Image (cartoon, rainbow, N blue to C red):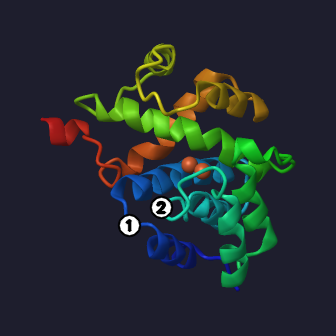
Amino acid sequence: MNPTRDRAWDTLTRYTKSESLLRHALAVEASTRFYARKFEEDEELWGVAALLHDFEYEIHPTLDKHPQDGAPILREEGYPEEVVETVLSHAEHLALPRDTLLKKTLFACDELSGFVHACGLVRPTGLEGLEPKSVKKKLKQPSFAAGVHRDEVYAGAEGLGLELDDHIRNVVEAMQPIAPELGLRTADSAA
Ligand SMILES: [Fe+2]
Ligand SMILES: [Fe+2]
């Protein structure tokens, strides 16, 4: 099958109803697609892997099932092995090698997109004007977005060979165009 965005969206929304999980998928997709363009890679395929990385979290919310029990479902639906393996590789507990640029990128975008999203939600102008400095300050506050694994944020940037500031700037820029879909205010909506 041709792993298009439409197919991935269809799969995702069959398994995921929660708005916050759908927003997470969209945020990670936007960040991963941003890097696909930057690295001149296959944006559609990268976006598909990102959209699907947590597609079955709602039915498999524990680490003994997620994401490994999602893999047979993706294979059954006909997704190429590159997508299946990339999805599996985002999970730290599976300790799979991140041996492609796509795997490194998905891992780097997963936790940071969630964290940037959380930063945007508490600002009157959402992501607009959100600087790496203030994101990094919040990373040092353990109580803020406590579910985000800081070590994975740092390891993700390092895996891509990026300074954390640059990675944050990229993810903020990537998510900005879909701010309304992510439930984030914009300067316009705040006015
Ligand atoms: Fe996950
Ligand atoms: Fe995720």
State which quarter of the image contains the N terminus.
bottom right
Q: Residue at x 12, y 35 (%)?
A: 191
Viewer-nearest residue: 18 or 28: 18
Q: Which residue is mark 1?
A: 17
Classify mark 2: residues with Cα within 10 Å, few (<14), some (14-19) or many (20+): some
Q: Residue at x 29, y 43 (%)?
A: 184
Classify mark 1: residues with Cα within 10 Å, few (<14), some (14-19) or many (20+): few
Q: Using residue 47 as the reference point, say whether residue 187 is left or right of it.
A: left
Viewer-nearest residue: 86 or 66: 66
Contact, CB < 8 Å: mark 1 with mark 2? yes
Does the image show residue 127? no
Say above or below: 61 vs 105.
below
Which element is circle 1 on?
loop
Disc 2 within 8 angstroms of ligand 1 (CB):
no
Residue 170 horizontal/vertical position (percent): 56, 36
Residue 55 horizontal/vertical position (percent): 55, 64
Q: Which residue is mark 2?
A: 58
